Image (cartoon, rainbow, N blue to C red):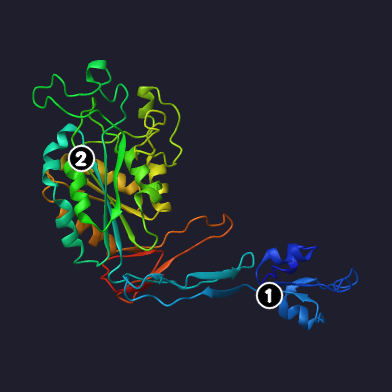
Amino acid sequence: AEGLNLCTSGSATSCEECLLIHPKCAWCSKEEFGSTKSIMSRCDFLQNLIANGCFGAIENPSSSISVVKNIPLSSKGSVQIHQDVTQIMPQKVALNLRPGDQTSFRVQVRQVEDYPVDLYYLMDLSLSMNDDLDNIRNLGTKLAEEMRKLTSNFRLGFGSFVDKNISPFSYTAPRYQNNPCIGYKLFPSCVPSFGFRHLLSLTDKVDRFNEEVQKQKVSRNRDAPEGGFDAILQAAVCKEKIGWRKEASHLLVFTTDDVPHIALDGKLGGLVQPHDGQCHLNEANEYSASSQLDYPSLALLGEKLAENNIHLIFAVTKSHYVLYKNFTALIPGTTVEILHKDSKNIIELIVKAYNSIRSKVELTVWDSPEDIGLTFTATCQDGLSYPGLRKCGDLKIGDTVSL
C-alpha cells in the first residue's frame, strides 16, 4: 500500500501552514493550481508538484549554514600583545534553519600551551585561620615559581573576608567595637569583623602579594559559618577592580576552615533584600553592601562565575570537604581540594586543581532559543565519537578535540 502523504493530508490552506507540516513539504504559489476542479493539492512533496505542472512557482526554502569567522587555533597562549589567542574554531556560525529540519556543525577546541593565568587568592581571616596566615606570608614567591612552570604569564591578586559585621553574625556590643577578641584568653587582640576586602589587584609583581599578606591580621565572628560567598561574588563581578584579563584563565582560590552562610541566612540579621549580583566595592575596596543585602544563593554564584569565566577552587579543611564537594555539583566549573589545617599544602593544592581544570573541556550553551533543540556528540583525543556527550577529559596541553 502506498504510504501516507503528510503534505497533502495536512489540509494546508497557506504557504506558512504547508511549510510547517514537514521539512519535505513544498508549496505551489500558483493560485489556479489545485483549484476545486482539481484533485491536486498546492502543498505536496517537491517532485509531485513538478510532476503535476507547477513550474517556477514553488516555495521550498532549505536550511543553510555558513561559517562567518574561522580563525585558526593558536598553538601557544603567551603571544605578542594585541594578538588574540584562539582556543575554539570556528568562532562564529550563521544558521538558517527551516522549522522541523535539522543540521549539524563541528567545533574544534584546543588546550593551548602556555596560556596566561590570573589567580585571585581569597582568604578567610576569621580567628581559626591565624596559623594559616603565618604559613602563607611568603606564598606569592613560591606560588609564582610553581605556576611559571605551567605558564610564562602569571598574575596574582589577594582579598580577604570574615562575615557581616552585624548581629548575630559578629560581636556588635560597644565593648567589642574595636577589638572583638577582648576578654578571649586564647587570643586577646584582633581587628573588627568585615565582610570582604579587596587588597591587591592582579599583578605580576608577586612581592606585592607577600607584602599585603604580611599586613593582615585575623578577626573574630560570632557564629561558625563565614561570609565567604559574599566575597566570592564580589571577586567575580568587580572585574575592573580585581583586574581579570580577557585572554587568561581565571582562577579564584577560596580558602576556609568552616561552612558558609548562604541566601536567606541574612534574615537572621534583618536583611530581607536578596543579593542583586552587582559589584559593591567602595573607594576603600571594601564590600559596602555587606549590611544591606542578603548572602548570595548558589544559583547566583554559579551564574556570575560562569558569566565572567571564573574557575572557583574550594580549598577547605577535611571536615568540610563533603559539603563543598556537594556545592561543586550545583556550581558548574568548580573544584574542591582538601586544605591542611595550617595551609602548608596550598601550592600543591592549587597546581593540582589547575591541572584538573586544564584537563577537561565542556561545551556549555547560553541563551539558546526555546524552540530549538540541541544534541551533542563529543569526539575526544582517542578519535572515538560519544553521542550525547558534550565534554572530554584527561586532556594534555596541546590536545585538540571536537564537538
Question: Is residue 324 found left or right of 189 in the rendered image?
Answer: right
CA distance separating discs 1 and 2: 67 Å
Tell me the quadrant of the picture where the C terminus can be found.
Answer: bottom left
Mark 1 Cα shell of 10 Å, populated few (<14), some (14-19), many (≥20): few
> What label does residue 273 carry, if any?
none
Mark 2 Cα shell of 10 Å, populated few (<14), some (14-19), many (≥20): some
Q: Which amino acid, mark 1?
A: Glu
The answer to which image quadrant residue 318 occupies is top left
Question: In this view, which residue lies farthest toward the right?
Answer: 37
Residue placed most toward the observer, 194 or 387:
194
Place of residue 93 in the rendered image (x, y in percent of width and height, measured from the top left) = 53, 70
Q: In the image, what residue occupies the spot 15% across and 34% down?
A: 128
The answer to which image quadrant residue 184 occupies is top left
Question: Is residue 196 found left or right of 49 in the rendered image?
Answer: left
Q: Which amino acid, mark 2?
A: His
The answer to which image quadrant residue 6 occupies is bottom right
Tell me the quadrant of the picture where the N terminus can be found.
Answer: bottom right
* Mark 2 secondary-structure assignment: helix
* Mark 1 secondary-structure assignment: loop
Q: Nearer the viewer's eye, disc 1 or disc 2?
A: 2
Question: Is residue 349 found left or right of 196 in the rendered image?
Answer: left
Residue placed most toward the observer, 156 or 255:
156
Q: According to the image, label 2 marks what residue?
A: 320
Q: Earlier in the sequence, mark 1 or mark 2?
A: 1
Residue placed most toward the observer, 49 or 91:
91
Q: In the image, what residue occupies the spot 30% across and 64% down?
A: 116
Place of residue 71 in the rendered image (x, y in percent of width and height, measured from the top left) = 45, 76
Residue placed most toward the observer, 177 or 129:
177
Place of residue 60 in the rendered image (x, y in percent of width and height, measured from the top left) = 71, 74
Place of residue 347 in the rendered image (x, y in percent of width and height, measured from the top left) = 16, 54
> What label does residue 2 carry, if any?
1
* 215, above or below 265, in the image: below
